[in-house]
Amino acid sequence: MTFPTGEQYELQTRTASGELRATITGLAAAIRHLSIDGIDLVETYGEESSPPYAAGIVLVPWPNRIRDGRWEHEGVERQLDVTEPALNNAIHGLLRFTEYSEVDRTQDSVTLAATVYPQHGYPYLLETAVHYELVSDGLKVTHYLRNLGHESAPVAVGTHPFLRIGDVPTESLTLQLSAASHIEVDDRLLPTSEVPVEGTEWDLRDPRPVSELQLDDAWGEAFATDGEVVHTLTAPDGRTVSMWAEPEFGFVQVFTTRQFPGRDGDAAIAIEPMTAPADAFNSGKGLRWLAPGDEWEISWGIRFGGF
C-alpha cells in the first residue's frame, strides 16, 4: 500500500531505559515517530496524513524562507517557486514533497537519499542523503550533501521536529535555548536585524515555562558546550528531551501552536536547528557554498534524559 507519507522505515533497539523506536517516512525523510519505552519524544501523526506543520521533515537546500522566492548572485537574479503564497515567500527548501529512496537499512538505522535537480531559481545538481541511527540516549541524524554540478552551489540545512515528553502537557514544560541573539522579523517573518538577548524577553538561556511563550521566532549565535549546541525541554519531574547539534547549526527556530492534530488545545513546540537563518540566499548569513565535487557532512540529534 502506498501512503501519502511514502515508505515507512521502522527502527528499534534496546537501551538501558527500555525499547527505543522510530518511524522515518520516505516523504521528506521525516521523523514521524520516536519513543522510549512507549513514551513519545516527538509529536506523531498518521502515515496517511501529510506532515502537519511540516513536522519532522528535512529542509534542504535552505531552511525557513526566501523573500519573494528571489535572490541574486554575481549579477544574475534567480526566481524560485513561491511556496508560501500568503506571505509571498519560498519556504523550507526543495525536497519537502520528495520521496527519498533507501540506500542502506539495519534494525536500528536507515540511510535515505534524494537528489536536488537543476530548476528555475536553483540551477544546481545536489546529491543529498540523511542517516538516522538509534543510539543509547536517543536518535542521531547525519546529513550528507555533495555538489555534482560544475559550479559552486549555495546550501544550508535545517529540520523541523516537534518535541514532547509523553503525556506531560507541553505547557508544563520549560524551554532553555543555547543562543545569545534574537532575530527580529517583519510581518512576513523575514529578518530585519539581530539583537543580543541579554536583558530582553528573548533571553531563554535560563529555562522559561512554555506556557508563557507564543513563538514563531529564530535565534542566532547558538553556542556550544562540550562541542554541542543543546536546546532542552524539561518536565516538572526532571525528565528532559534535548535537541543537540554540531556548532555549524548556529541558528534555531522555535514554533509553538495550539492546533497540532491530536493535542486538544495543548501546545506543540518545534525546535528547529538551522545552519542558516531565513533569507540566507540574500543575506549570505550562515550560507555555505559547495564547490564542484565538494561534500558536507553535519549531525544533530534528539536526546532523552531522566527516563
Image (cartoon, rainbow, N blue to C red):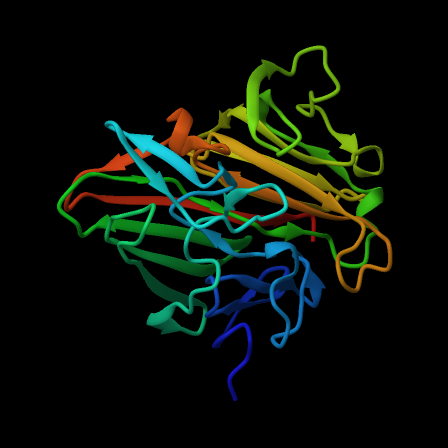
Q: Residue furthest top?
A: 199
Q: Residue furthest bottom?
A: 1
139 w.r.t. 232: above or below: below
198 w.r.t. 117: above or below: above
Position of 271 with respect to 276 (left or right) is: right
* Residue ID at (36%, 65%): 111
* Residue ID at (46%, 62%): 29
* Residue 21 percent location from the top left of the image: 58, 68
* Residue 107 percent location from the top left of the image: 44, 74
Q: Nearer the viewer, residue 87 or 27?
A: 87
* Residue 195 percent location from the top left of the image: 59, 14
Q: Quadrant of residue 248?
A: top left
**Residue 236 seen in the current view:** no
Q: Quadrant of residue 14?
A: bottom right
Count of labels in the image: 0
**Residue 292 seen in the current view:** yes
Q: Nearer the viewer, residue 185 or 158?
A: 185
Q: Nearer the viewer, residue 288 or 130?
A: 288
300 w.r.t. 71: above or below: below
* Residue ID at (72%, 10%): 199
81 w.r.t. 198: above or below: below
* Residue 94 percent location from the top left of the image: 41, 54
